[in-house]
Amino acid sequence: MNPNELKQVLSHGLLSFPLTDFDAQGNFNAKTYADRLDWLAPYGATALFAAGGTGEFFSLVPSEYTDIIKTAVDTCRGKVPILAGVGGPTRQAIAYAQEAERLGAHGVLLLPHYLTEASQDGLVAHVEEVCKSVKFGVVVYNRGQCRLTPDSLEKLADRCPNLIGFKDGIGDIELMVSIWRRMGDRFSYLGGLPTAEVYAAAYKALGVPVYSSAVFNFVPKLAMDFYNAIAKDDFATTNRLIDEFFLPYLEIRNRKAGYAVSIVKAGARLVGHSAGPVRAPLTDLNAEEDEMLRKLILAQGAQ
């Protein structure tokens, strides 16, 4: 799949980030991970991001990364495209991107470089070096310390033909409008705020109809139903699901920092597709929160 073909794939449909499976000792479990991908693939996500944020990319080591991407590519071959998460310092991000390309992934999502502040020139250099290290498509994730401006993205678009996507995880509407108006259809635009469904209608109005769903990991039918309702402007359905499911879900998620991942792992376990515990520094939901989430899932007939 060349970069332009990947851009077309990412311009429609629902995207998701599969959880990374760990066993009771916290080690990568390839078998249950493959089973998870086999379970999710038929529900109709346009593409899946292996080792993304919800997949705890930030807690993985290189040998695990290779196993995870290889398992995802092998399991989903001919079913659904796989993009790999990459990130961290520039040379590390390049190494991961090149490994993902070697393993047969269709592209990468470039996550933030994490702690260090950087100028716009520095961010442009970082993204450019990663893009030029591979031939397949790259999607940049605007989040955390990576906050690119329209000017910076215009420079990158000129220098990096394989930079085909822009994912927003900041939620700055003025910035998003400025980028979309400046860059037009040069990029595929993805909504990437945590629990993106809550923002989906607003982002669609901005010209960003595609987003990634974390809850697809444990209520895939509900996630697809919500996406289809958004696509059809079925506000009765979207408002009902926001009131009945997503707002109560946010009340649990917002109890502790890091629960955006932890609650998804809890949900997968509660519906019979456990991905094991989260790794430190994340923490799992407590028993009370588990029960709240279980009741919420049951109320939607999703278990």
Image (tube, helix red, strand yellow):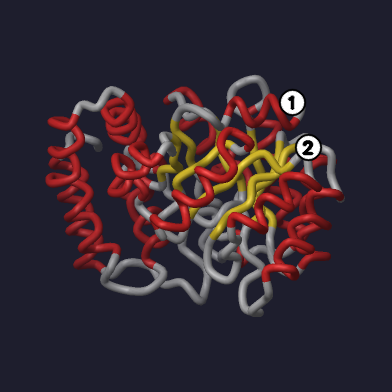
From the image, tell me which residue sits under label 1. Answer: 1
Residue name at image x 26 percent, y 71 percent: 255
Mark 2 Cα shell of 10 Å, populated few (<14), some (14-19), many (≥20)? many
Judged left or right of residue 273, residue 230 is left
From the image, tell me which residue sits under label 2. Answer: 136
**Residue 220 higher or lower than 139, as above or below:** above
The image shows residue 195 at horizontal and vertical percentages of 35, 52
**Residue 272 higher or lower than 123, as above or below:** above
Per the image, label 2 sits on a secondary structure element best described as loop
Residue name at image x 69 percent, y 34 percent: 73
Q: Are marks 1 and 2 in contact (CB under 8 Å)?
A: yes
The image shows residue 21 at horizontal and vertical percentages of 54, 51
Amino acid type assigned to the residue bearing label 2 in the image = Phe
- Residue 249 occupies quadrant: bottom left
C-alpha separation, residue under disc 1 versus residue under disc 2: 8 Å
Tell which circle, 1 or 2, labels the residue nearer the N-terminal end: 1
Mark 1 Cα shell of 10 Å, populated few (<14), some (14-19), many (≥20)? some
Q: Is residue 72 visible?
A: yes
Judged left or right of residue 247, residue 72 is right
Amino acid type assigned to the residue bearing label 1 in the image = Met
